[in-house]
Image (spheres, coloured by chain):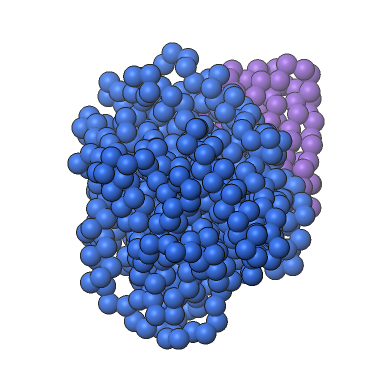
Amino acid sequence: MKTDSFAEKTARDRARSLLDAGTFRELLDPFARLESPHLPVQEIVPQSDDGVVIARGKLGDKNALVLSLEGGFQGGSVGEVNGAKIAGALELALRDAREGKRIFPVLILDTGGIRLQEANLGLLAISEIHSAMVALREFVPVIGVIAGRVGCFGGMAIAAALSTFLIGSEVGRLGLNGPEVIEQEAGTNEFDAHDRVLIWQTLGCRRRLAMGQIDLLVDDSVDAIKECIATQINLGVTKKQRGTVARTRAIAAQTQKIQDHATADLEPGDAKTSSSGRGRRWYNALMENADEHAEGKSLLVGDAQWGTETIRAISVVPNPLARFPRARQGQMGVEEGWGIARAVWDAIDSDNAAGKTERAIVAIVDVPGQAFGLHEEQLGIHLSLAAAADAHIAARESGHPVVALIVGKAISGAFLAHGLQASEILALDDNGVEVHVMSEASVSRVTRRSLGEVVALARIAPSTARDVHSFAALGGVSRLLKVNDADEPSAQSVEEVRSEILQAIRRARADAKSPRARLESPAGRASRTISLEVRRILESQWSMEL
Amino acid sequence: METLHFEFRAGRQFIQRRVQVGVVASGNLEVLLEPEVSPVSRVRVRTSVDGYRDEWMAILRTFFGRHDVAAAIEINDGGASPPIVLLRLEQALEESRK
């Protein structure tokens, strides 16, 4: 008998095939007509469901929620509408879980990550997805499935790593950076995007299983995948704050793999630095007399006492001697992500053990991006970034005020790992502060547009702009801070910024806000109207009887 | 991207239920088919390939020539060839009868 291929189905048929016959009920279906308003203005044909199917139904005797991304439409990329559909559905499942109604979420991840045409809107949506997934894991297993032709990349690879149980099929691939982007950013010597054998040996789910980065490898068959999901739902494993199940798979095992991994010194002593050095300068300015817990030299971690508040500040900085060449210029690499996770967990665990007030975590953000490299992908850089994001979420949820201060660049996966999970994001009001998802050269290559077209796009699609004011207009920043000179701040400017951080810490102590709260800010409400509309309609359709 | 509108005299058969088929992928398309109660069948096409109005007209004429239906149709096209377009339209109609 011929097996029923899962990969060859559309997103809707995949969702339908996983749910018991006759129970499939789609929310915000194609006739809700909530398509992307951002694509037609960029001369791109939209799809009626914006490339995601949200379905409720039965799986065995359990209530399931299937979120299925359509890899065929815009590479399964996450924009404002489909991002809001996923985040909104997870938020409703969380609301129900807190009321004792367990709904089991299954994410079918066939996605290239953030939709470049909707850039920072996709970035914000993905930060909301991460936050909801982690909160939901405390109640039900959050199951990820990577079994489509696109695979799972970018911010959604981080989401995959945050799932409780991750299933991959032989046709699935998983990685933070896609081959084309690595080649664009680091050259063919680093990664030849035409070398199919290399791609599968690095990103293929078979390889991911061998590295302990997914939990199960299955055949590309509907029956096999459905059976695995049903088994996990019946096991019902949850990830408690301090449970026996490792939160981001096993930190120790993964970091050991990094230590054992031979890494070629591809370009020793590259003098060119892509970080502004602001991360170090602001760390030093704010953290004078800090008690250092240096996590290697590419990560500054230290504690300081600011009045009654104990602060743990964390900043990623350039380090010419770093073990991984691609992370020497201040990028967020495998060591940096795991390092942040350790630094944050150390604060959580030691305050808890000593019975002390939860200290504040201050994420100083100046990261030119994630590290683009072959070794990074082999070791699962997506997992290390997920560990960092997960640690920030854990800190926030266990009573630690988490505040981010953007002093330089805040980019894509690096920002998802370090900054976006803060209760509040503060940013210097300065031209050197940038928030975006990919270099213009890579956007140009992936979207097949000229560099000039990409630059011009920012005028019609503000979410693709790179300046901090555009990001603040999306509700991404709670306060823009004026300083005399962002590169050489005066003592007075440093004092003012410190005072702003302390006020944000106080607000976070009173009310620890998740990324979702950014949508409710005045700027968020004004600019992300369709994100709110999606949630409103989703809620109205949510509770109808199955 | 080009948006095209077409109108045909509505046929005698009504669409039983609205359906969506297909994906806006490269060389593929999505068809949304709904009942139309007015005497005019309306079709809106959004296509990634500009300048093929006559070809669209020919495909839709073929479809409405074969089927005496009253329908509202929306097509989101990722550059599908005429046979694929016709196939999706037929598929949508068949689904609507299930």
Residue A77 or B53: which is nearer the viewer?
A77
Residue found at x 42% / y 86%: A268
Against B18, residue A118 (above or below) is: below
Chain ID, purple in image: B
> Where does residue A534 sit, x and y in percent of width and height?
60, 30
In depth, the one of A506 and A314 nearer the eye is A506
In the rendered view, tell whether residue A498 sits above or below residue B24.
below
Query: Residue pushed farthest top?
Result: A545
Q: Residue furthest front?
A: A307
Residue A274 place in picture, x, y as percent: 56, 74
Instruction: Examine the image and state in which quarter residue A493 appears.
Output: bottom right
Q: Is residue B23 left or right of residue A66?
A: right
Q: Quadrant of the N terminus of chain A?
A: top left
Residue A14 at x, y percent in the picture: 41, 37
- Where A290 sits versus A346, above or below? below
Identify the residue at image location x=40%, y=57%: A303
Viewer-nearest residue: B23 or A335: A335
Q: Report which quarter residue A526 is drawn in.
A: top right
Question: Horizontal placement of A152 versus A207: left or right?
Answer: right
Which chain is the one coloured blue? Answer: A
Image spot of residue A371 (x, y percent): 45, 68
Q: Residue at x 27, y 63 (%)?
A: A255
- Left or right: residue A419 compared with residue A454: left
